[in-house]
Image (spheres, rainbow, N blue to C red):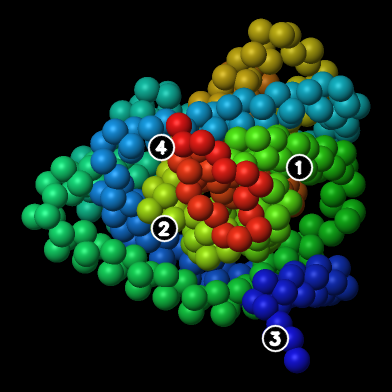
Amino acid sequence: MKRIKLFEIILIAFILGVIFGAFVGEPAKSLKPVGDVFIKLLSMLVVPLIFTSLSTGVAGFDIKSLGRIGGKALVVYYVTAIIAICIGLGLANISGVGTGIELGDLAKIEPLEAPPLITVLVNIVPDNPVKSLAEGNMLQIVFFAIILGIAMGVTGRASDPLRKGLESLANVMYTMVRFVMYCAPVGVFALISWTVGTHGVKALSPIFYLILLTYAGCAIHIFLVYNVILRFGAGVKPFEFLKRIKEAALFGFSTCSSTATLLVTMRLCEEKVGISKKLCRFVLPLGTTVNMDGTALYQTMVTVFIANAFNMDLSISQQAIILVTALLASIGAAGVPGTGLITLMMVLQSAGVPLEGIGIVLGVDRIIDMARTATNVLDDAVALAFVAGTEGEEFAEGVRIKKVKKS
């Protein structure tokens, strides 16, 4: 008898959660604490795993190859982000989403002042690395981990005890991840039941078009843009690759947390796709921190949506500002408290769109967040595959189309 895989159990839990939430309705929100506990279990592992994985991963490269690999990853991150933003702007402009919507009494939100970009960049450097680890400041953790990894690589054999200790801690974190993943079906069921039960179909109807377009934009980005990068850049079979990491996409979709999903993505890319642990431990934590295509796509689309709701005609220059600001916001998002709300405010303010418009979409933000998080997760994995392919790595059997010459 065929053994049921964990992914299949999670998928069943997801479907049952949708059915239960739709049937029970509002009382399903009582399950939210169960989902919150599951997210907390994953979150408690993220900081030590990112720190140990990234620092030991960087230590395994020489400076020259580290710069080359990091450069390749960043190129993919920001080329795909620009394309995602253009897709969002294109769909929003063509569809006229938000036009004619009944505003009513908007939920007034007191504007939070978004920090200037230069402040975000300066704050990447931690005053106290221990404090950064305690507070979970991801950009500062990534910065310190990279510097520590470089220092261990340059120090050489004298740093072996520290490196082995960090590698040992990383392996223990992986074991803890496996323990927590046994709770995944229960956590996913609770989160989806709460989402469907709280919002329901009626709550979605006023902005159903925005939700539909966001999902369509993410689908275009995944199945067109990522397809091209995987096939022609990484030299792998796109649908075979996506099939092997589908658990990570579903996990991100269910939890709305790309950071928590990092643990799943790393395991799948190593075990199912066959990418080396060294690359996974460098590229994926970096991408989770600064690479957010789905978020960038959504922010541009919702900005046009709110502008249309207020009968604003956005000029070409305003839309260019939206593109640039959304790109910069996706870089600094992980280092800003209240990430989603504040970065969206940054984009709205840059285009002169009323901040009060956020009240229109806040009620269903969770529904939209599911699609953009899944896109963010897949983007990190696609960038990793591109780097691995161009570095001449051997993938698992059946993944590669052709051997890409090492650059």
Callout 4 touching callout 3 (CB < 8 Å): no
Residue 404 seen anywhere in this rendered image of the structure? yes
Measured as percent of width and height from the top left, residue 121 is found at 36, 28
Residue 200 or 173: which is nearer the viewer?
173
Mark 4, secondary structure of its residue: helix
Q: Name the residue that disc number 2 marks.
A: 277
| Mark number, residue 69 | 4
Disc 3 crowd, CA 10 A, few/some/many (<14, 14-19, 20+): few
Of the numbered discs 2 and 3, the one sitting upstream in the chain is 3
Q: Quadrant of residue 20?
A: bottom right
| Mark number, residue 3 | 3
300 horizontally vs 151: left or right: right
228 horizontally vs 139: left or right: right
Which residue shows up at 33% across the image and 38% down it? 66
Of the numbered discs 3 and 1, the one sitting upstream in the chain is 3
Of the numbered discs 4 and 3, the one sitting upstream in the chain is 3
Mark 1, secondary structure of its residue: helix
Which residue shows up at 22% across the image and 53% down it? 130
Callout 3 touching callout 1 (CB < 8 Å): no
Disc 4 crowd, CA 10 A, few/some/many (<14, 14-19, 20+): some
Q: Residue flagged by tag 1: what amino acid is it?
A: Phe
Of the numbered discs 2 and 1, the one sitting upstream in the chain is 1
Of the numbered discs 1 and 4, the one sitting upstream in the chain is 4
Q: Residue flagged by tag 2: what amino acid is it?
A: Lys
Q: Nearer the viewer, mark 1 or mark 4?
A: 4
Measured as percent of width and height from the top left, residue 87 is found at 74, 28
Q: Distance of mark 2 from mark 3, alpha carbons?
A: 27 Å
Q: Distance of mark 3 from mark 1, alpha carbons?
A: 30 Å
Q: Name the residue that disc number 1 marks.
A: 223
